[in-house]
Amino acid sequence: MPHPAPSPTPDLTGRDTIVAIASGQAAAGVGIIRLSGPLSHDIAARVCGVAVLKPRYASHRAFRSDTGEVLDDGIALYFPGPRSFTGEDVVELQAHGSPAVLASLVALCVRYGARRARPGEFSERAFLEGRIDLLQAEAIADLIAATDERAARAARRSLQGDFSKRVDEVSTLLLNTRIHVEAAIDFVDESLETLGLSAIESNLNKVDVAASSLLEAAQRGRRLNEGLHAVLLGAPNAGKSSLLNALAGYDRAIVTDVAGTTRDLLHEVVRVDGVSLELVDTAGLRDSSDAIEMEGIRRARAQASQADLALIVVDPRDDAASVVMDEARNAVRRLWIYNKSDLVGEVANLLHEGEPQFAEDAYVQVSAKTGENMESLHEAIRNIVSDGAMSESTSEFSARARHTEALDRTQEWVAQARMHLTHEDLELTAEALRIAHDTLGELTGRISPDELLGHIFSSFCIGK
């Protein structure tokens, strides 16, 4: 049985004023100091040497120390709460992006009564003040970390509330089902048919369909955000390490003619059409009595069962390919790569004969050593990445592991509710639906433990 959802989080909103560099630590043409809290206006006005800052007006000011020395000059912007990012009074001081100048301005604001912000504290306050939900807060970090346009678009959609809207739709279905079940509990002397059993079952089906669809979308968003986990499998000397080097564009792995050179896992990240591919090179699959090599083979097998995609490297001249085929059965998706075309010439896809479970797999013939036909390999990978679960759509949003895990647990509790309903136990049905509803609430933060918030916002940049 799944674990119950945690209890609601208390309001942790602080009333002190925080300050941080919001533009990063590297030198730049412009740097931004951000203040949030009740003293923001007074501290910034004192730095600017004025009594009042005009709301939502960019004013050019000299920034002076407490002794009157001009530290820099720049732009001051004042956003009174609650119409600000954090919901509190916010001021941004835009100075020259010298790390020394920005550090001195932050230190000055601290002397005037501000506190240095924790990582993610600005976004945390925006969440606690109801300006954004937790999914949108995490999307800020995803947008900052996005390394390509597609990931940035997905993060923007989450930030705009696309993910949150779909969660709310499932939540509404769950809530309506709970209401129906809990209302029926008051009439326990009536038959379930009289109390609307068919309607409850219909609502549970709608919840299940909507939650499954949302989970699939979140899994796509998670792969886009975190990258596709791909493992290189093959017999010793099939050319896995050479292929890793060819895809990475440099000599990442040691390549020799000695079988069993690779004994541990080697990780490398490459990009295919804007999607990260974490490639893991593994030990060659074969029977061995060497303790170290056996551990490497065990890890290779574990990677095969966990990976989103197995790139199975085969030397067509090697009879050990049958051993690799046995291990490949555990992989979710497979791409067969017949290597060493410079030595063996063109070969048919013989490994698929008599193996119906491999009949739909893609395959390509290359030479990792000479680079022959590598573009076909890239195209095959692109086709797999773009197929089905990885295809781009206008509704694509960014997601994380905690999102898919919460959705998994939500579906488990919905299944529990269905089971209890089958046994006509309305109290347990209602309780399972309540936990499912609360678990779903973890996504947006409406139901979220203190430690969850702390973990999420601690991963943010200072000043965000």
Image (cartoon, grey):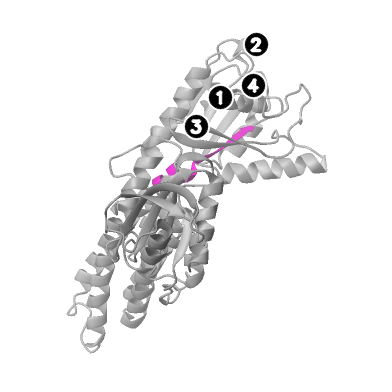
**Mark 2 vs 4, N-terminal side:** 4
The answer to which image quadrant residue 137 occupies is: bottom left
The answer to which image quadrant residue 199 occupies is: bottom left
| Three-letter code for the amino acid on which mark 3 is drawn | Arg
**Mark 1 vs 3, N-terminal side:** 3
Q: Residue at x 42, y 47 (%)?
A: 73
Q: Residue at x 30, y 50 (%)?
A: 58
Residue 242 place in picture, x, y as percent: 65, 23
- Whether residues under marks 4 and 3 lie with C-beta atoms below 8 angstroms apart, the answer is no
Marks 1 and 3, how far apart in space? 19 Å
Kindly state the secondary structure of the residue where label 2 is placed. Answer: helix
Q: Which residue is mark 1?
A: 337
Eyeballing the image, is 191 above or below 279?
below
Count residues near mark 4 (Cα–Cα under 10 Å), then give few for <14, some for 14-19, many for 20+. many
Is residue 351 visible to us here?
Answer: no
Identify the mark at residue 343; answer none if there is no mark. Answer: 2
Marks 1 and 2, how far apart in space? 15 Å
| Three-letter code for the amino acid on which mark 1 is drawn | Ile
171 or 14, which lies in front? 14
